[in-house]
């Protein structure tokens, strides 16, 4: 089999993604970037949402365009309703509609609960929980017009699993778990599916501090039954499947992708 044939076969894995308009928040790095690139490969039209890093976002756009895809970078703070509204109207104006929204933008801040600054709590909840609320509302209003759409929230194993030092992050992800379940019911009559993806430890900038310290990295790997951290592309492939028509009967649930971490009783 020639390399060209192999490439084409890989590119068309999910044929129903061709020409779908996919908005991905926080797509200039980490898991969001990997999802954007994979969606581009699947011939979707991709909106790269970013905040404050135009060069990184433009680089993702270029990577997709160099692979013959269509992509557009739009800046918006997902915690601000006017900016979210602008991002969705820009998408509709330039690409016609929103078929898939991936709520990926997220931050985490570590500190013991007794010392956690109120501002850290507010910021983590604003980006990780209010962001998906606002983006879903704006996108689902467009999806409801065609009675078809998919919302995918990049949650975390910590929507369920406690994580000492990360109380705000856990509260936001726990909230996202319920938001997914509630919105799946509210949006089902409008033809919109809502699904959470819960990654464990993935090789991204959010984990850089742990992964660049050999001792911490080893301790983390010991917690993971598969014995390694995941790659962003592994999460991206799952998201592409969930966004495709092949996954049309999945809604209101969480798909965990964590190498078995959730089932390990360790120090987490
Ligand atoms: C967090 C990471 C953590 C992983 C597993 C993710 O949600 O962002 O910091 O390593 O969960 O605990």
Image (cartoon, rainbow, N blue to C red):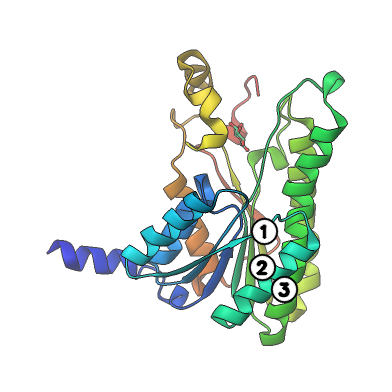
Q: Is residue 216 left or right of residue 187?
A: left
Quarter-of-image position of residue 137: bottom right
Q: Nearer the viewer, mark 2 or mark 3?
A: 2
Q: Residues within 10 Å of mark 1 (few under 14, many from 20)?
A: many
Residue 237: numbered disc: none
Q: Is residue 167 visible?
A: yes
Q: Marks 2 and 3: CB-CB under 8 Å?
A: no
Distance between the alpha carbons at the discs numbered 2 and 3: 13 Å
Distance between the alpha carbons at the discs numbered 1 and 2: 6 Å
Mark 3 element type: helix
Residue at position x 59%, y 70% from top? 100
Distance between the alpha carbons at the discs numbered 3 and 1: 18 Å
Which quadrant of the figure contains the N terminus? bottom left
The one nearer the camera, 227 or 101, is 101
Q: Is residue 83 above or below residue 157?
A: below
Residue at position x 43%, y 76% from top? 18
Q: Marks 1 and 2: CB-CB under 8 Å?
A: yes
Task: Give whichever of discs 3 and 1 has the lower sequence position.
Answer: 1
Q: Which residue is mark 3?
A: 140
Q: Is residue 43 above or below residue 115?
A: below
Q: Which residue is mark 1?
A: 76
**Where's residue 218, x and y in %?**
47, 18
Q: Which residue is mark 2?
A: 87
Task: Give whichever of discs 1 and 2 has the lower sequence position.
Answer: 1
């Amino acid at each position: 089999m020639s390399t060209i044939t192999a490439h084409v076969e890989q590119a068309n894995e999910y044929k129903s993604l061709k020409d779908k308009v996919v908005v991905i928040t926080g797509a200039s790095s980490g898991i969001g970037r990997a999802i954007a690139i994979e969606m581009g490969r699947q011939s979707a039209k991709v909106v790269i949402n970013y905040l404050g890093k135009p060069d990184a976002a433009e680089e993702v756009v270029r990577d997709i365009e160099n692979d013959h895809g269509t992509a557009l970078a739009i800046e918006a703070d997902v915690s601000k309703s006017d900016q979210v509204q602008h991002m969705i109207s820009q998408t509709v104006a330039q690409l016609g509609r929103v078929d898939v929204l991936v709520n990926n933008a997220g931050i985490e801040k570590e500190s013991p609960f007794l010392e956690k600054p109120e501002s850290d709590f507010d910021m983590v909840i604003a980006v990780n929980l209010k962001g998906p609320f606002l983006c879903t509302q704006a996108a689902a209003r467009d999806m409801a017009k065609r009675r078809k759409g998919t919302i995918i929230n990049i949650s975390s194993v910590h929507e369920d699993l406690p994580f000492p030092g990360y109380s705000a992050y856990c509260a936001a992800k726990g909230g996202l778990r319920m938001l997914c379940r509630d919105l799946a019911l509210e949006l089902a009559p409008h033809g919109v599916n809502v699904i959470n993806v819960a990654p464990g430890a993935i090789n991204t900038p959010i984990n850089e501090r742990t992964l660049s310290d050999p001792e911490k990295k080893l301790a983390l790997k010991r917690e993971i039954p598969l014995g390694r951290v995941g790659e962003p592309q592994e999460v991206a492939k799952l998201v592409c499947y969930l966004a495709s028509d092949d996954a049309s009967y999945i809604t209101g649930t969480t798909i965990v992708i964590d190498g078995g971490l959730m089932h390990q009783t360790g120090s987490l």
